[in-house]
Image: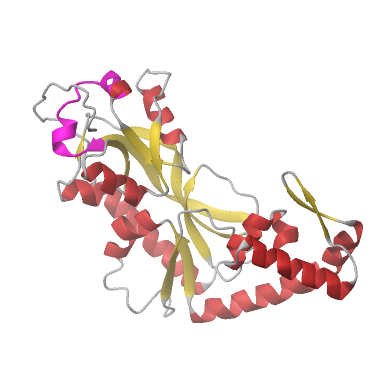
């Protein structure tokens, strides 16, 4: 079912927490038991055979019914939300103090992942906080917080920057799953060409690298705020750019009202986001400047 729905052994293996070889062996065992070939490998994934298509169509309704019933039961026991690690660590978790009783009497369980989990396939998850543009087919949700972007760096690194154009010859760092962030910031500052960016797999590691002096990162409010509050990072330039992406709270659009626990979490999240936006100070830049020269030893 996972392979048929995703059309990819790699994606299905990730969803099932299996290696691709292990999943391939299971597919071969299933095909041997059924006495027919279910999938054909192609350059960009796998495709159902005629027999596989008929088999999938026959069992999909039953599988969906079982998955939905299981998800509804689990929702009554625990509210499971998937969220990017940096958002969870730097914004969400610090605000959950006092919510030990859960939401609507249901405890909250956070599942962190740097990738965008497929809620249609991961039916054990009740919702997701996702950074992106949207909309997403089959999902319903609301924008929780805008994504405001501004360059940040360790204070001594930031002091070498005088204007946006200076960043064209500075070491830039970012995330490999959202390469458009820096391009959007440069475009908003009147610079069409963005230089190469050294990529990490999540924002948390990106900000830690910037705090270690490895380069200039693009701060995303609200995720970067804790680094600024601790003075581990400072804004490189005044002003911020509102990205096309935003933080969304999503759930499966199954035609039903959200569960009591999900609705309670949604209302709490909206309130926390409104308080954060109201208290958010403007990005200012009042630091002294120093000259910069490239060094073979790195930034």
Specify the quadrant of the image occupied by residue 54.
bottom right
Observer able to see residue 255: no
Describe residue 262's horizontal placement relative to residue 295 as left or right. Answer: right
Q: Is residue 62 magenta?
A: no
Q: Is residue 188 left or right of residue 167?
A: right
- Choose between 13 and 67: the one closer to the eye: 13
Q: Position of residue 240 (x, y in %)?
A: 30, 32
In the picture, the quarter occupied by the C terminus is top left
Most distant residue in the front direction = 296
Q: Which of the pair 35/79 is nearer the observer?
A: 35
The structure residue drawn at horizontal position 18% and vertical position 21%, both measured from the top left corner, is: 293
Residue 124 visible: yes
What are the residue bounds of the magenta stretch? 152-167
Residue 221 drawn at (x, y percent): 31, 44
Q: Residue at x 66, y 63 (%)?
A: 21
In the displayed structure image, the side of residue 262 where residue 216 appears, left or right: left
């Amino acid at each position: 079912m996972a392979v048929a729905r995703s059309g990819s052994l790699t994606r299905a293996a990730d969803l099932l927490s299996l290696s691709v070889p292990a999943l391939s062996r299971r597919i071969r065992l299933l095909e041997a038991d059924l006495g027919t070939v279910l999938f054909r490998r192609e350059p960009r994934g796998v495709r159902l055979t005629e027999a596989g298509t008929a088999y999938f169509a026959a069992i999909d309704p039953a599988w969906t019914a079982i998955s939905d019933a299981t998800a509804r039961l689990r929702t009554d026991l625990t509210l499971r939300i998937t969220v990017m690690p940096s958002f969870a660590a730097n914004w969400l978790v610090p605000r959950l103090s006092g919510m030990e009783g859960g939401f609507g009497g249901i405890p909250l369980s956070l599942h962190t992942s740097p990738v965008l989990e497929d809620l249609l396939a991961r039916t054990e998850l009740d919702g997701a906080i996702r950074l992106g543009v949207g909309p997403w087919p089959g999902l319903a949700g609301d924008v929780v917080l805008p994504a405001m972007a501004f360059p940040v760096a360790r204070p001594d690194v930031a002091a070498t920057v005088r204007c946006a154009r200076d960043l064209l010859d500075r070491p830039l760092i970012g995330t490999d799953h959202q390469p458009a962030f820096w391009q959007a910031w440069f475009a908003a500052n009147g610079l069409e060409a963005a230089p190469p960016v050294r990529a990490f797999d999540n924002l948390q590691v990106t900000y830690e690298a910037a705090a270690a002096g490895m380069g200039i990162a693009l701060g995303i409010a609200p995720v970067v705020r804790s680094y600024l509050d601790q003075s581990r990072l400072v804004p490189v330039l005044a002003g911020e750019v509102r990205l096309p992406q935003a933080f969304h709270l999503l759930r499966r659009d199954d035609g039903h009202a959200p569960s009591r626990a999900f609705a309670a979490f949604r209302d709490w999240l909206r309130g926390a986001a409104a308080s954060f936006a109201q208290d958010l100070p403007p990005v200012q830049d009042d630091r002294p400047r120093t000259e910069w020269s490239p060094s073979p030893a790195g930034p």
